Image (cartoon, rainbow, N blue to C red):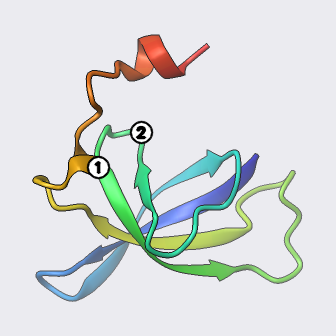
Amino acid sequence: MVKVILVMHDLENDDYYKMNKTSFESMPQVGQYIYNNDGLAYIVEEIVYFAGYVSSKGAIATLTVHPADENEPASYLYGLNIERDLDD
């Protein structure tokens, strides 16, 4: 698992703020859609890796994201229930 800190890019105010720490099976790429644990879709804008950090101890990078347009197909879970279909 790769631990990262999500940073929101508030496009309306051109501001940035920390959202939360989360983990992925593999590192997302710039331009990729991700789902956060809030159930919303985001687009990865930028990835910044921390030099010298060990992934077993904490986050290794920040992912700067902004919300996906709510009309984009990726904003829908296509009938998936996260707790039922994705969690073990």
Residue closer to the observer: 50 or 77: 77
Furthest residue toward bottom = 14
16 versus 58 height, above or below: below
* Image position, residue 66 (x, y; %): 30, 69
The residue nearer to you, when weighing 3 against 44, is: 44
Q: Amino acid at mark 2?
A: Asn
Residue 13: image x %, image y %? 14, 85
Residue 55 falls in which quadrant of the image? bottom right
Residue 10 lies, in percent from the top left, at 23, 76
* Earlier sequence position, callout 2 versus callout 1: 2
Residue located 44% across and 11% down the image: 84
The quarter of the image holding the C terminus is: top right
22 relative to 27 in the view: left or right = left
Whether residue 10 sits left or right of residue 51 in the image: it is left
68 to the left or right of 87? left
Are there few (<14), some (14-19), or many (20+) residues within 10 Å of tag 1? Answer: some
Which element type, helix, strand or loop, lies under badge 1? helix
Give the quarter of the image for residue 51.
Answer: bottom right
- Residue type (three-letter) at the residue carrying disc 1: Ala
For the point 21% across and 88% down, the residue is: 14
Residue picked out by circle 1: 74
Please report the residue visible at 63 percent of the width from the left and 48 percent of the height from the top.
23
Is 28 drawn above or below residue 51 in the view shown? Answer: above
Horizontal side of 51 relative to 70 (left or right) equals right
69 or 60, which lies in front?
69
Image point (26%, 84%), residue name: 15
Q: Residues within 10 Å of mark 2 (few under 14, many from 20)?
A: few
Per the image, the residue denoted by label 2 is 37
Numbered disc 2: secondary structure? loop
Residue 42 image position (x, y, % from top left): 34, 59
